[in-house]
Amino acid sequence: MIQVALVGGAHIHTPGFIRKLNERADVSVKSVWDHDRDRAERRAKELDCSVVSDVSEIWADESTVAVIVCAETDRHEPLVLAAAAAGKHLFVEKPLGLGAADSRRMADAIDNAGVLFQTGYFRRSDPIQRFLKAQVGAGSFGRVTRFRHSNCHSGSLRGIFDDEWAWMADPVQAGGGGFLDLGTHSLDILLWLMGDVVAVTAEVASATGRYGACDEYGEGLLLFANGVIGSLAAGWVDVAHPVDVLLSGTEGHASVVNGELFFQSSHVPGADGQTPWTDLPDAWPHSFDVFFDAIAGRPSAPLVSAREAAVRSAVMEAMYVAARERTWVAPEPV
């Protein structure tokens, strides 16, 4: 039995993680800590476990082998550093940090401690994203020239950040707004497929003004070291989101329209781009489940490394800097 603790229950994905925890027969949640005592007690009730008043009790508990950090992003660093020092495996909900500096310190601590790490980049598990990565690696697109990825919903229009999740619309606590919150998932796929970024620029804005100065949507451009030009769209104010992937190369093309992949390649028989391509790999488990499978010694998919997570925070920070300064910015190394 894998014994874990929930450290912070602020993130909007926390209820989904709690459902997964309650469904796993090989995981037992011993305790919950949150700086907000009422929230800690609600989460503990949902998990049928105890609340601790001092988070150091979790670090000192040798029977707790892993922690799930779903605290506000600006609270990640001290919690992650302490957990790593205590030798706890770490699932830290995305994004890892506010930017390059805090994320670098966390990645260093995690790597030095030798503990397992995972974060919530669940889009990697999707069969279409897995297929695209494999085909890029196989050269089916020839020289890739452009790669556009987007992740949008109508969260602001529905007011989902009005109450319990209001901190996510506070850039001081969250590091950004809608462009960061949803864009970090697409950013992960862009970097996962294309590699290192050398410069970025972006524009972010608010459509409703519902959350004050918090951005609700944005567009970014990324120049990759291999010459690919990437673009990223994300936000909380879209009433529809039919096209989330466009990938172009000198010998191939892919688009994802309403969840269906259209794939064209001169290297792959039958890939004429005219009908949905359905010959896809199986889905990996959700990134949250991959973490516990790894702890149990039954790896079901690769983990996201702490360094990868830190790079994504650094690149996103650079895009916000670029938006403020209206220029191109090179992400800080991590």
Image (cartoon, rainbow, N blue to C red):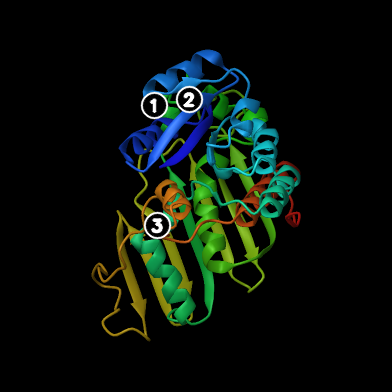
Residue 305, position as x, y percentages in the image = 58, 56
Residue 51, position as x, y percentages in the image = 51, 19
Q: Quadrant of residue 246?
A: bottom left
Q: Quadrant of residue 334?
A: bottom right
Q: Which amino acid, by three-letter code, is at mark 2?
A: Phe
Query: 239 and 285: which one is in front?
Result: 285
Vertical arrangement, residue 192 with respect to residue 142, above or below: above
Query: 139 and 227: which one is in front?
Result: 139
Q: Select label 2 or label 1 by which is in front.
A: 1
Query: Which residue, given by chain and number where applicable, does mark 1 sit on?
Result: 47
Look at 53% across and 41% down and name the residue there. Answer: 66
Q: Select label 3 or label 1 by which is in front.
A: 1
> Does residue 118 appear in the picture of this structure?
yes
Left of 307 or right of it: where is 272?
left
Q: Secondary structure at mark 1?
A: helix
Query: Can you name the residue that lies furthest to the top here?
Result: 38
Vertical arrangement, residue 296 with respect to residue 180, above or below: below
Q: Which amino acid, by three-letter code, is at mark 3?
A: Ser
Look at 43% across and 26% down and name the residue there. Answer: 160
Query: 271 and 300: which one is in front?
Result: 300
Q: Secondary structure at mark 2?
A: loop
Look at 39% across and 59% down and name the residue there. Answer: 300
Dot 2 crowding, Cα within 10 Å, few <14, some 14–19, many 20+: some
Query: Which residue, given by chain and number where applicable, does mark 3 sit on?
Result: 125
Q: Which amino acid, by three-letter code, is at mark 1?
A: Leu
Q: Quadrant of the N terminus?
A: top left
Query: Which residue, given by chain and number where applicable, does mark 2 sit on?
Result: 161
